[in-house]
Amino acid sequence: MNEIDTTESRDQEDILRRIEDSAEKLFAQKGFSATSVREITAAAGCNVASINYYYGSKKGLYERVLKRYLENMCKIRIAAIDEVTARKYDIRDLVRVFCESFLDSLKGASGELGTSDLLLRECLDPALEGSPIERMVNHLKVVREKMVEAIERIYPELSGESLDLYVISIIGQLWHFAHLLTEDGQVHRYIEHPISYNIVVEHVSDFSVAALKNLLSKGGQDAQD
């Protein structure tokens, strides 16, 4: 590849990144139907025709943005789990890092927690064919399995079923809090007083570690009964 080809390739990569970053933020804020191609290209600083040229249609762009979001989410969480399990760790180390990576991964390309609404909107008002829940489950299954495996190394006496439910419960807490946090990390829905990102991480970590200790004290049966 010569210098001209390399420059053109970098220029195209920059255009695609700007389009997808802008689209991700707008789709999260307004939803698929309420977001126009013109809004996306204006925010990205590119030609309106570029959407059809690179993605075939607005829906093609939306599908690419959603896929990119899910893949990035999984990559961040898996990397965090791998980093912890590569050294000596305890359950609090693991859960805390997972909580941090979970919320960090929801920020998307724009770095704002508000982009987590991208998935919420797709679940409530699907723009794509097929189940959005199934699409998310397929992408995130490997993350859940890695967490279960990491906890089993600490507590081999617990069954896979118990740990699977335990990890799902942590995800449920974080998912709920994620949709309360505004872009600057302060709660703006349902909760009367502001609460920071760090407080959410601490709360979910403390709550989840205590829950697991309770499960252990009862022989791991609660999750199965």
Image: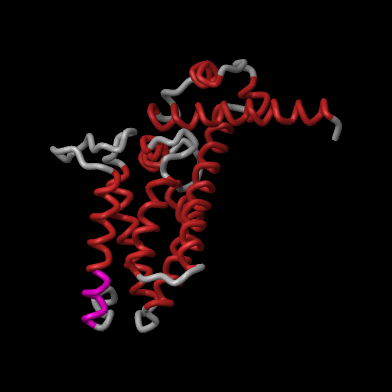
**What is the number of callouts on the image?**
0
Q: In which quarter of the image is residue 170?
A: bottom left
Q: What stretch is highlighted in magenta?
A: 211-218
In the rendered image, residue 21, in percent from the top left (x then y), is placed at 52, 30
Residue 20 part of the magenta segment: no
Q: Is the magenta stretch mostly helix, strand or loop?
A: helix
In the rendered image, residue 209, in percent from the top left (x then y), is placed at 27, 67
Residue at the image point whose x is 60% and y is 17% from the top: 46
Q: Is residue 48 above or below residue 56?
A: above
Q: Which colour scheme is used?
A: secondary structure
Give the left or right position of residue 163, taking residue 49 as reference.
left
Give the left or right position of residue 74, taking residue 47 as reference.
left
Extreme residue in the right direction: 2
In the rendered image, residue 12, in percent from the top left (x then y), is placed at 69, 27
Q: In this view, does 160 lie above or below 195?
A: below
Q: In which quarter of the image is the N terminus?
A: top right
Q: In this view, does 220 lie above or below 107?
A: below
Residue 213 part of the magenta segment: yes
Residue at the image point whose x is 50% and y is 19% from the top: 43
